[in-house]
Amino acid sequence: MIGKTTWVIADGYLPTNSTGNQVSHEAVCVLNLTADEAVIQLTVYFEDRDPLVGFTCLCGSQRTHHIRLDRLANDAGEQIPRGVPYALKIDSTVPVIVQHSRMDTSQEALALFTTMGYSG
């Protein structure tokens, strides 16, 4: 079986502003190669406050799902704050592959990076 059920992204940061036509954002890209739908739970950790919980997404069988973190809200309506460093734990009901990307357009010379998550 390809994939893991727990992944961690240690470096998260939603830039506070954007320039041009691109919006600064981050995404968690999930690939589900199993025959079952994946229920994805995200927990957001901070340096100076309690974690945010209650973020749930679905990724269909044999599908991908790109979770835009700047648009994500938990069951209490809370969102990941901009301008605050954070980390993510991603839990899935089936083994998945997780990749993280950031589009930073806060400067004219925009930056895009991507990295694979760490799976335990």
Image (cartoon, rainbow, N blue to C red):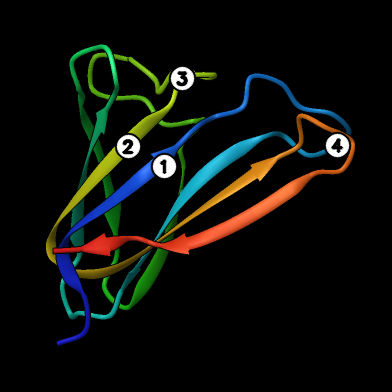
Q: Residue at x 76, y 27 (%)?
A: 18
Whichever of callouts 4 and 3 sits on the residue coming sooner in the sequence is 4
Q: Taking 29 as reference, is 75 left or right? A: left
Q: Position of residue 79 (x, y in %)?
A: 39, 20
Q: Which residue is mark 3?
A: 84
Image quarter in which the N terminus is found: bottom left
Q: Position of residue 33 (x, y in %)?
A: 27, 80
The mark tally for this picture is 4
- Name the secondary structure under disc 3: loop
Q: Residue at x 27, y 61 (%)?
A: 118
Dot 4 surroundings within 10 Å: few (below 14), some, or many (20 or more)? few
Residue 11's label in the rendered image is: 1
Image vertical order of residue 58 relative to residue 36, above or below: above
Give whichever of 49, 82 is nearer the camera.
49
**Mark 2 and mark 4: span between their CA atoms?**
27 Å
Whichever of callouts 3 and 1 sits on the residue coming sooner in the sequence is 1
Whichever of callouts 2 and 4 sits on the residue coming sooner in the sequence is 4
Q: Taking 55 as reference, is 13 left or right? A: right
Q: Taking 88 as reference, is 85 left or right? A: right
Mark toward the viewer: 2 or 4: 2
| Badge 1 amino acid | Asp
- Name the secondary structure under disc 4: loop
Residue 21's label in the rendered image is: 4
Q: Which residue is mark 2?
A: 87
| Badge 2 amino acid | Ala
**Mark 3 and mark 1: span between their CA atoms?**
11 Å
Image vertical order of residue 96 relative to residue 1, above or below: above
